[in-house]
Image: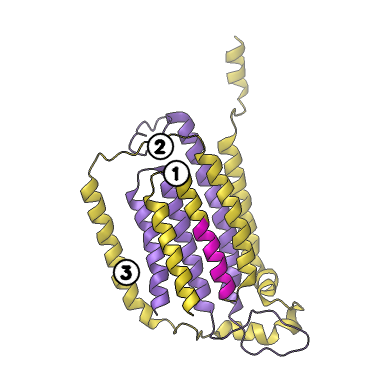
Amino acid sequence: MGIYLLCLLLFCLGIYCVLRKRNIIKIIIGIIIAEYAVNLFFVLVAYRMNGRAPILSPDTTITNMVDPLPHALVLTAIVISLASTALLVAIAMRIYEKYGTFDITKIKELKG
Amino acid sequence: MVELYILLIFMIVGAIIAIEVKDLLSSVVAVGAVGLGLSIVFLILKAPDVAITQLVVEILALIILIRATLKKDLPFSTSGRWMLNTFITVCFIGVFLFIANKCLKDLPEFGYPIMRVAGNYLKNGLSQTGATNFVSSVILDYRAFDTLGEATVLFTAVIGVLAIVRRVGRKKDSEKLEEEE
């Protein structure tokens, strides 16, 4: 149970970074950390004590495999998180070109 | 399981450094340390496919972030309602952790998953799909529509990045005429 709480603590660090920081790059970093924590939570739920990786081998019969379903879902989520990170960074770089700063309190003119 | 706790605490320390350090480049490098630690945790949790993907994606994300932060000045403002902001954030996180702590009791205990759906996959996966790696059989056969949706999201994001990064957009015919005049 303690390991779930540590994972949630990591998630809370990401949320704290998103809510509190004023720098756009820091906000993106907070989102990345929160994504890591959620992925880690899924894989933690899938783990089985003294389990084996869910890959068959020809000679031996393996009975204690870990749960493969969350692994597949997390695999999808990781790739999507890379795409969304790239999109966020692209927007941040355009904002820097236009306003010359990453500070969100200085970016006030919303009109294009 | 001791190594799991050690790695998780390492990741939390890395995240704190990434959040609190002033220099943006150091912060990005600290995030890289957190991601590589996460990849090792996936290996310990017996998820080799996820670990490989995490490694590759982590390095790509690091390259993108470093490209964004190089040679940029970083003024940190401390004006505004700083105390109120912090207070509300900490309150929110406290409430979140309290509720999460209550909900965690309903989850199956760590190391003993239920596996109601996955048991079926593990039993019939080889005869139904012919794949020896069950993760790939789930991705590409049982839940192939998930992967299709993932590809859609990926291409949408790529189109978005191209549209944002491109310098000059195509002009309408009327605008071209106005410029010529």
* Residue at screen point 47% across, 66% down: A38
Decide which of B97, B24 is in the foreground and name it.
B24
Q: What residue type is labelled 3?
A: Leu
Q: Mark 3 points at which residue?
A: B97
* Residue at screen point 47% across, 54% down: B30
Against B12, is B141 above or below? below
**Residue B174 inside the magenta-drawn segment:** no
Against B162, is A51 above or below? below
Q: Looking at the picture, how far across and down is residue A34, in whole percent?
A: 44, 60
Q: What residue type is labelled 1?
A: Leu
Q: Which chain is indicated by disc 2?
A: B
Q: Earlier in the sequence, mark 2 or mark 1?
A: 1
| Mark 1 in CB contact with mark 3 (< 8 angstroms) | no
| Disc on res. B164 | none
Label 3, secondary structure: give it. Answer: helix
Looking at the rendered image, the quarter that the C terminus of chain B falls into is top right
Q: Which amino acid does label 2 sit on?
A: Leu
Label 1, secondary structure: give it. Answer: helix
Q: Looking at the picture, how far across and down is residue B178, in whole percent?
A: 57, 14
Q: Looking at the picture, how far across and down is residue B62, in whole percent?
A: 56, 50
Give the chain ID for the yellow colour.
B
| Disc on res. B74 | 2
| Mark 2 in CB contact with mark 1 (< 8 angstroms) | yes
Q: Which chain is indicated by disc 1?
A: B
Which quarter of the figure has residue A31? bottom left
Label 2, secondary structure: give it. Answer: loop
Q: Name the residue under label 1.
A: B24
